[in-house]
Amino acid sequence: MRRPHREPGAAATTRARTCAHHVAAACPASWPETDGIGRFLAAEREEHFAALLRDDTAIRHAEGRATDDPAHYRALPDVPAAHPLHDQWRMRDLSIDEHDGLGAARHFERHFPCRQAEMDALPVADASVDLVVFNASLHYSTDLAVTMTEALRVLAAGGRIVVMDSPIHRHEADGAAMVAERADDFARRFGTRSDHVPSIGFLTSARLREVGESLGLEWATHRVWYGWRWAWRPWRNRLRRRRAPSRFALLVATRRRG
């Protein structure tokens, strides 16, 4: 198992761990805050992610996710049914874009802490949170065991890790094909494959079971019903001799007792 990336951000993570405050005020003197966003990425890591964030921002703006209307953000997750991205709008924690990243927090009347950081080096003290949520993000991990280890570090006793909106496949080959198809689609529509930073790309039952066994986790799977049209997809693809489509579920991990 690879160790999580720590240099040159090792000192930053150490300072965050020893902070006496919660994440809302984790080590404010150690890292700069710009436009209300704590910047917990070292310069080398910003450069590492630069191409990915540039492409990602361009793609998501092209998809129609950008708006200057504060009412749009304040109404989330509810948007007009006619909106082309009605059930897909996302807010992220690596991008600081003012429309589709942490910068969009400026549209809200109530302030809440925003931190730009890597999921493998969280600026959060040990055992300080009750809930860790990976919202449409865990499949961007470069090493599932490393990312889950970091989540467990900040999780308090009795806490939960929730994974939502990450593609799940039964077979590795189907997941790999999905990732390749997505990259080809982006290249065709947006002129970039948006694959500058490697990632696991998808989850499988085997991967979850393996990381659960190695880290002492128990997984609970909650199925999500998207309607009959969505439920028909696996059978439709089988009839058309295509790969199995991605599945989505709400996954909850807790530390194994005993």
Image (spheres, rainbow, N blue to C red):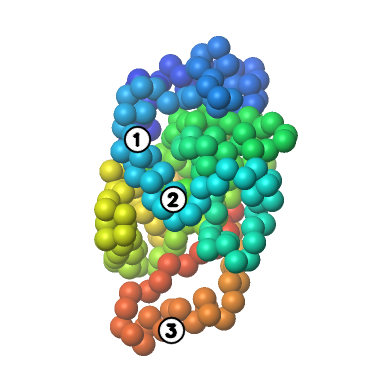
- 3D distance between C-alphas at marks 3 and 2: 31 Å
Q: In the rendered view, tell whether residue 16 sits above or below residue 3.
A: above
Q: Nearer the viewer, residue 152 or 95?
A: 95
In percent of the image, x 44 and y 56: which residue is there?
63
Q: Which mark is residue 179?
A: none
- Residue 130 occupies quadrant: top right
What whole-number distance in Å separates the C-alpha atoms at marks 1 and 3?
38 Å
Is residue 234 something one can see in this rendering? yes
- Residue 60 is marked as 2
Between label 1 and label 3, give the one nearer the viewer. Answer: 1
Q: Give the number of the mark in front: 2 or 1.
A: 2
Quickly name the residue at label 3. Answer: 235
* Amino acid type of the residue tagged 1 in the rendering: Phe
Q: Residue at the right extreme?
A: 110
Mark 2 vs 1, N-terminal side: 1
**Between residues 240 and 144, which one lies in front from this camera angle?**
240
Amino acid type of the residue tagged 2 in the rendering: Arg
Task: Name the residue furthest top.
Answer: 29
Q: Secondary structure at mark 1?
A: helix
Q: Residue at x 53, y 63 (%)?
A: 84
Q: Which residue is mark 1?
A: 49
Give coordinates of residue 229: x percent, y percent.
Answer: 53, 80
Going from N to C along the chain, the mark reached first, 1 or 3, is 1
Q: Secondary structure under badge 2?
A: helix
Tell me which label, 3 or 2, sits earlier in the chain.
2
